[in-house]
Image (spheres, rainbow, N blue to C red):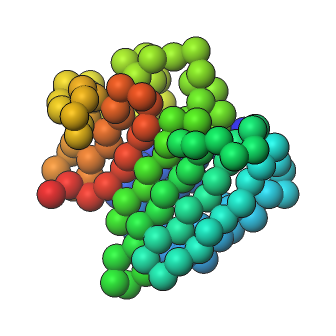
Amino acid sequence: MVSTLIQAQESFKILDFHLGMTKDEVKTIYNRMKEVPVAQYVSMEPGQYRDQIKIDNEFGSISNKIDILYDDNAAVNSVTFQFRVTDILLEASDMDHIQLAEKLSKDLGIGGFEEVTIGTGKGLEFSDGNLKLSIDSYKNIRLQKSD
């Protein structure tokens, strides 16, 4: 496992990812995931405004990415952990999205999540006015700046 959940002063860290981090910091986390294999398959597709790290124990499966979006200054402004990543790295395969939200609340030391509509489904969201943490019913987790 890469890391436990940690709360930072200005942003949350989830598996060492946080808002405002640089592309070099993302690359460092990726290299650590490769050095101490967190799953059978770990790869990265870098881009100018978006990086994707694929993590899985099956070849060719879907919903196995960490999707990292950057602003014009190359700072992270959104991180999405698709549900297979959540299941593998957060050991959440036996949890539903409500149990996962409870775990995140406890680990991050935050208040409760509110029920919201995410896309066409239901989910849970926490916002402190600066950042937003959401979990959909499939257990995809997204950390982003608040609107």
Q: Which quarter of the figure is the N terminus placed in?
A: top right
The spot of residue 70 in percent (x, y) is 40, 73
Q: Residue at x 37, y 50 (%)?
A: 143
Q: Residue at x 59, y 30 (%)?
A: 87
Where on the picture, by quarter, is residue 124?
top left
Q: Residue at x 66, y 65 (%)?
A: 44
Where on the picture, by quarter, is residue 72?
bottom left
Q: Is any atom of residue 92 visible in this view?
A: yes
The spot of residue 96 in percent (x, y) is 45, 17
Q: How many numbered markers are drawn?
A: 0
The spot of residue 34 in percent (x, y) is 80, 57
Q: Is any atom of residue 111 visible in this view?
A: no
The spot of residue 79 in percent (x, y) is 43, 55
Q: Residue at x 34, y 32 (%)?
A: 136
Query: Does 55 sit above or below residue 120?
Result: below
Residue furthest out toward the front: 60
Query: Does 99 sit above or below residue 53?
Result: above
Q: Which quarter of the figure is the C terminus placed in?
A: bottom left
Q: Nearer the viewer, residue 36 or 13?
A: 36
For this view, does 14 lie left or right of residue 141? Answer: right
